[in-house]
Image (tube, coloured by chain):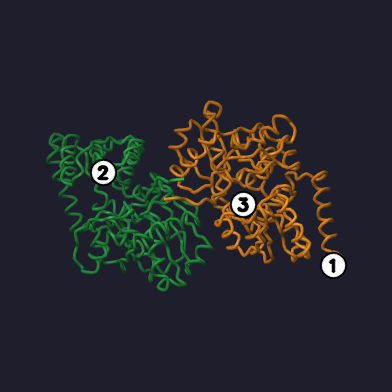
Chain colours: A orange, B green
Amino acid sequence: MFLFKKNAEMHLLLNQLLIFIKKEYVMPNFDAVIKAYKRIEPFIHKTPILKSQLLNDKLGCSVFFKCENFQKSGTFKYRGATNALLNLSESDFNNGVATHSSGNHAGALAKAAKIHGTKAYIVMPNNAPQVKIDAVKNYNGEITFCESSLASRESTLKKLCNKKGATFIHPYDNYYVVAGQGTACLELASQIDEPDFIIAPVGGGGLLSGSSISAKNIWDNTKVIGAEPKNADDAQKSFRTGKLQPPNVPNTIADGLLTALSDLTFRHIKQNVSDILTVQEQNIPVAMKMIFQYLKIVIEPSSAVALGVILENREFFAGKQVAVIISGGNYSMKL
Amino acid sequence: MFLFKKNAEMHLLLNQLLIFIKKEYVMPNFDAVIKAYKRIEPFIHKTPILKSQLLNDKLGCSVFFKCENFQKSGTFKYRGATNALLNLSESDFNNGVATHSSGNHAGALAKAAKIHGTKAYIVMPNNAPQVKIDAVKNYNGEITFCESSLASRESTLKKLCNKKGATFIHPYDNYYVVAGQGTACLELASQIDEPDFIIAPVGGGGLLSGSSISAKNIWDNTKVIGAEPKNADDAQKSFRTGKLQPPNVPNTIADGLLTALSDLTFRHIKQNVSDILTVQEQNIPVAMKMIFQYLKIVIEPSSAVALGVILENREFFAGKQVAVIISGGNYSMKL
């Protein structure tokens, strides 16, 4: 342990090796999700289920919205971030955590670190929107700015981890993060009867793969469906070709769904998910407005994609019970 | 009863006489609120309380938001409308209810009538916004359009009541409506400890007077405060002069707060309310955006006025426990 602290470089390498081994041989299973829930339950919100009779009448099916926009830090990402943080050894915990992200994972990790009393080092591109910078600062996250290229982000992060001895918590390509994200669906199972479908948005696949682990182990007949923007349909392509596809150059307002699947999340998705359906760009704001109007909740565009899938496939979902995971509510509303 | 039905004009007169007598001699008291709650409880939502640590840190006090934006029809008005409807005699009930309104009371009354199986006749100005017309139509309300003047609304309503034998349910100058609105605060008392303050927006005063009846009878030290836009400050003027003031020509985005107090609501407010505080117009959208950002809920501008009062009186509320009644969420969001 002493050597670890003395040699941050070796520490990082061993950490990466551990992540590699876990990814290859220790896929998180339902037991990992249950353990994650026991670990994080005291620190998270049990988010409510909302439904609207008027909206159901319009859609022709019954939809139950699992409102992770009410989760701490405004997103389900708080579950995975907390689980990953609380799994660190004492010395790793004390050295803090790090990630490169300009999105919800950064805010969630910073908040979790603040609540539990350690440091979060966040690498952000120097063109990140002020609202995202403010979110991380609100939670006392320590921001290091870099160029906006992936290469610059990764090298800045690596240097930071070396310097601080901080552990890199990947937004989704991480055993404990995926297990933590699976707890939203585990919790959902205590709030509704078995649905015909669960729809979750898919970007990097943390929420979708975590949800699929829970759903497949809890219910017999529930089908898990991923929802993504047509303009960022790499997950659908990966799913349908059976081969991990690189991200296209996405052009969508669903800014939380720009990332591509990882090897870890893709394995779960191939195994447990029934299909990935896409949504035309113009239907994302339509779905968003329906949720504002009927549910009276603020959601981010990425969350609207799941309702978009129902809007574009009405016959398929007609008369069914559908659970939709609302992934987050970090959106700057206009009046 | 037979004569009543034969003579709708006399029916209406007797109804008005009854309202007059009740207003003069039978002010709704806490017992009326409790009876209202027993009556309407099976048909309404028990709305949640939301709070945000981050928002509290910014405000310097602890705020509990009673979220009536999640109430049926998207507003607390559903409580009063349901209570008034369920108090009608069988024959009056069967003849239906009527009101003139282009706002939340119309939607609430139409929905309550639909749910309980009678007709709602709504008089609306022919320049009413499409979104309000649609809301009433969604609930099968039967709309009669008229000129936008008050005289035209009243004469159209009178004719309609005569023709249909429908009972006029005033949006706030009504014993059962005020008692019904008081149930939001009664419910709140089962959800939080005694607060230092309750803040409710004030337009016609139904919510504020109903809340004040409950608060004064439940808690020993809680102060009830009304919140209204500076640009529609007739309630503050009435309160401070002790004499009912006519509405000024209001120019505010808080479209639910344009109406003036009635004799009935003013009596309660004089008796139970500590103060009425106003909010500068430019602070209403600021407060609205804070609620979107920190609570992730959609509210209408009228509801933001209560938070606006805290923003403009930070020292006064510093360190206090404050309950805010969010009156409704019927607002067309822009993206």
Please say whether residue B97 is visible from this viewpoint. Answer: no
Question: Which mark is first along the chain, 3 or 1?
Answer: 1
Relative height, residue B224 to residue A197 (above, below): below
Q: Which mark is residue A202?
A: none
Q: Along the line of sight, which residue is nearer the eye, A183 or A313?
A: A313
Are the residues flagged by discs 2 and 1 from a single subunit? no
Q: Which chain does the residue under circle 3 lie in?
A: A
Q: Disc 2 vs disc 1: which is toward the camera?
A: 1
Relative height, residue B146 to residue B297 (above, below): above
Q: Which residue is mark 3?
A: A103
Q: Which mark is residue A6?
A: 1
Residue type at numbered disc 1: Lys
Badge 3 crowding class, 10 Å Cα cut-off, few under 14, some 14 to 19, many 20 or more, is: many
Local secondary structure at mark 1: helix
Local secondary structure at mark 3: loop
Relative height, residue A263 to residue B204 (above, below): above
Percent coordinates x, y for residue A113 in the rendering: 67, 62
Labels 1 & 3 near each other (Cβ < 8 A): no
Q: Which mark is residue B88?
A: 2
In the image: residue B200, left or right of residue A12: left
Badge 1 crowding class, 10 Å Cα cut-off, few under 14, some 14 to 19, many 20 or more, is: few
Please say whether residue B4 is visible from this viewpoint. Answer: yes
Name which residue lies at 73% across and 53% down. Answer: A154
